[in-house]
Image (spheres, rainbow, N blue to C red):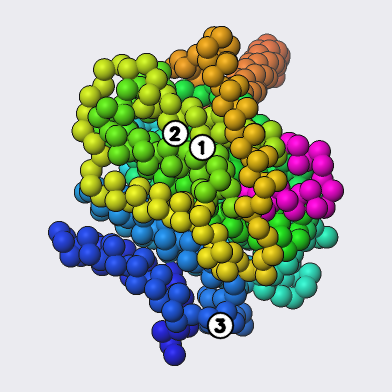
Amino acid sequence: MWMTELPPFIPFFIAAFLVILTRGWLRYLLILATPVLGGLHLWLDVDPGIVTSISILEYDLILMRTDRLSLLFGYLFHIAAFIGVLFALHVRDTTQTVSSLLYAGSAMGAVFAGDLITLFIFWELLAITSAPLIWARKTETAMRSGIRYLIIQVSSGMLLLAGALVQYYQSGTLEFNYIGLDSISGWLIFIAFGIKCAFPLLHNWLTDAYPEATPTGTVFLSALTTKVAIYTLARGFPGTELLVYIGAVMTVFPIFYAVIENDLRRVLAYSLINQLGFMVCGIGIGTALSLNGTVAHAFSHVIYKALLFMSMGAVLYRAGNVYASDLGGLYKSMPKTTLLCIIGAASISAFPLFSGFVSKSMVLAAMIEEGYDIIWLMLLFASAGVFHHAGIKVPYYAFFAKDHGIRTQEAPLNMILAMSIAAFICIFVGTQPSYLYALLPWEVEFQPYDITHVLSQLQLLMFSALAFVWLTKTGLYPDEIHSVNIDIEWLYRKFLPKVVRSIYGYTQKACNRIINICEASFNVAHQALHDTRIARLHIASNWPTGSMVLWLAIILGFFLLADAID
């Protein structure tokens, strides 16, 4: 019975400790067995309705609260963790291995947390355990990006803690259920979730840090942090209409950055925000269909986005860079990676028979049902855009564009196996969606493969492909060049520091001027006093120490004599 109530994060934390003590095949076995055995335990032994808590002082911390929503994300994170550790099996870096296991365990802890304080603890652990995956790249850019990432993530945690404390003061409870935006605590928690979900203007930690992580670390980052945020939004703010408009903006604006971006991992980071927008819209609608679509799309997205990041990680590992301007022709050296990348591209583009189609169409159908016609058109445009940059640009420029003569080896076997598992899931879910639908939190009555959905999606993809070809052939498509594209991060990386330095400089000059004026005024006053008759009597002059002692003795004797007379 106690095994059933064992919180899923504990095996990952124990494995992270044991990794430090093991080497060789025993370490590899431990790394691979942890997500496999943990996932099987969750699937076979854990049912909805379990609550595990501990009491600290007068508070009950709910370490494990299971329902269909948390269980599905638990299954998903175990699958993602296994794919991630298998992809990174060749890495001989204990720091990365330990961080990956702790990071995955923290995601499990956040998903099964039943109260806001427990959620806060794992929320912060997500930040602390994931930052080393960026720093492990060991470049100056990665170090700076990792520090910025950590500061922003910890700030999100502080907002969550503040919201939790305010909620406890107002309602007397810390349970993590529906929150809404009817109070200041709700807004604080909403913003905290929004930072980790990469809301517009709060998104640059993602596009700044993810491309700077190690080839293997980015796979974990893409799968866990933002999906924990999607889970918390789905539990705390379903039906919040503001999310519909926030999500719509998230689907559209990254397209323009992804089209002009040269770093293909940064292209995928922008497309990640684009796909999060579909999920946020689904949460905002708040119907059973839209929420099921959000959860299903989160499941599909973790797998196909991991597959795309793994393919670009393999390219970075073998070719040494992922710049569109410097690659091309790699299909000759890396044919297996090329094929697997194309499967990921087809999935994110929502081709029929691939996973993205059976999940994204649920959100779009819910949007039409609830009368959000304009937002639906925005999401349709975003669907064409993601095929344009993630579905075509990434595989085309990495493997097929102008051949720069790079000849290398195929990706290592463990990388190929990890990508193959992800590709299989993409195809299996796309062809057999009923298995995924059966796991969704609410009852599903949706058929993705009707003639309307299939034909409309194929038309969208066809015209998007024609647009890419036409823009490329006419020279209107932006050139792939090494450049820095200015995003909102320019404000806090360049503009605000410059403003602060300018204010500090002007303040320092003003203070120095005031000090100089005061010194000049003092000198004038001192000189004026020095020229007076009193000063000439040496009362205002420096007296020798002997004279001072003599005068003190005379004055003391005078007071003693006066006292004796009295």
Amino acid under label 1? Answer: Ala
Marks 2 and 1 sit apart, C-alpha to C-alpha, by: 6 Å
Q: Is residue 345 visible in this depiction of the protein?
A: yes
Label 1 residue SS = helix
**Is residue 249 found left or right of 547 in the rendered image?**
right
Q: In which quarter of the image is the N terminus?
A: bottom left
In this rendering, would 168 be left or right of 56?
right
Give percent across and percent down for residue 64: 53, 76
- Which residue is at a point 63% across and 69% down the rendered structure image? 441
Residue topped by disc 3 = 50
Residue at the image point whose x is 35% and y is 47% from the top: 419
- Counting labels gives 3
* Residue situated in front as seen by the camera: 108 or 464: 464
The residue beneath circle 2 is 265
* Magenta segment, prevailing SS (helix, strand or loop): helix
Three-letter amino acid code at the position of disc 3: Ile
Residue 74 against residue 315 in the figure, above or below: below
Q: Which residue lies furthest to the left in this view?
A: 24
Q: Which of marks 1 and 3 is nearer the N terminus?
A: 3
Give the magenta range.
360-378
Of all residues, the one furthest to the bottom in this rendering is 1
Name the one closer to the observer, 551 or 272: 272
Quadrant of the image occupied by residue 329: top left
- Residue 470 appears at what percent x and percent y? 57, 16
Find residue 445 and report its image quarter. Answer: bottom right
Is residue 125 visible from the viewing direction of this image? no
Task: Please give the residue where the numbered disc 1 appears in the rendered image.
Answer: 269
Please report the residue visible at 60 percent of the width from the left and 21 percent of the height from the top: 467
Circles 2 and 1: CB distance less than 8 Å?
yes
